Image (cartoon, helix red, strand yellow):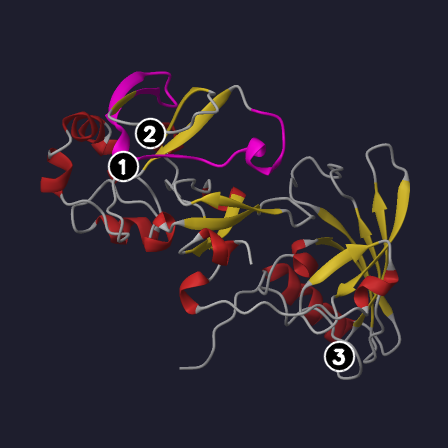
Amino acid sequence: MGMRYRIDIASLVIAKCMKNHVADGGAGVFFVPLSLFFNGPANEKFRPSSGNGNEYTLKKLVDFDDNNVFKEISTRNGIAVLQKSSHQAFPVKCARVAKDRATEDYWTGPIQGTEMWIQSKNPEDFTNRFSSVRISKNQQPRQGMNSCGLNKVFILEREYDRRIRLSGVSVLTNGYGEELKIESDFVFPLLNVASFGGKKPKVQKFILCPYRKDGRELSRDEIEQYPYMAKYLRKFKEEMLNRKGVLIRNKMKSGMYWSMLGVGPYSFSGWKVVWEAMGRREFRATVVPGKWQGNQSLHAFIPFDNKAKATE
């Protein structure tokens, strides 16, 4: 079986337009989602590389930053000026437009020796080679736990307390404003802005995770050993069974309607190197004990067995 690639439809449309409708040396100007250049490997085939061999090259990029240019489009977007040419030079000029319409000059392109594109005011950032970090197969980056649309059921909260540890039976509140008792063994604190040096929130959120430490769902018999959790899960059985999505529906086929996505043995590792993944341009990682969990795609982490390895 050949390799499979994820790619945005927008990149296919633009590439076809440049190939079929722009003369050699001509230019095309496109309104684009900036994920085509900056979000992971999905669009690597679209981005021009250094040297010869490209169908087109990037001449300039405009980043609208947090400006909402079109009311119907909420994703980060900008303008890409492409030229029908084979030789791409880096870095490329990039203009970032602030809320007050002031423009800052940046440079953009891939970090030397990688496929990762960044923006920087210093053009030398694109010529300094970064040393690679080797990780084992069981340390691949992960996103946080995913309730598949039922955050109001799975995410619980209480007033913020720096003593985060729960024990015995805890009193928490769900997303519907209902107060409930639940066994603390299956309730884990969620990362928040304070985890990365930000302001302490008014409430601390937790996620209910009816799983064993090996990353497998608790069986029905195991669930029944915890009367508060069993009663709570039965109350929302219909809502859980009505969740959409092929992956979560496949997981629930065995009857375990309390299944989630993004849960595995890595979720319960001793330590995690974590960072804010959604909407952040700067990589700020921190080390936390393994009980802390990421909130879906808002956070990402690499699991480690012990603190020494995590802080190397």
For disc 2, the neighbor class at 10 Å (few under 14, some 14 to 19, many from 20) is: many
Magenta stretch encompasses residue 176: yes
Q: Is 150 placed above or below 162 here?
A: below
Of labels 2 and 3, the one closer to you = 2
Does residue 179 appear in this view? yes
Q: Position of residue 92 (x, y in %)?
A: 85, 64
Instruction: Please give the label number shown on residue 220.
Output: none
Q: Residue 258 colored magenta?
A: no
- Compared with 288, 13 (above or below) is below
> Disc 2 residue type?
Val
**Residue highlighted by disc 2:** 153
Q: Which label's residue is closer to the chain start, 1 or 2?
A: 2
Quadrant where the C terminus sits is: bottom right
Give the residues in magenta.
Answer: 171-200
Q: Are marks 1 and 2 in contact (CB under 8 Å)?
A: yes
Element marked by disc 1: helix
Identify the secondary structure beneath mark 2. Answer: helix
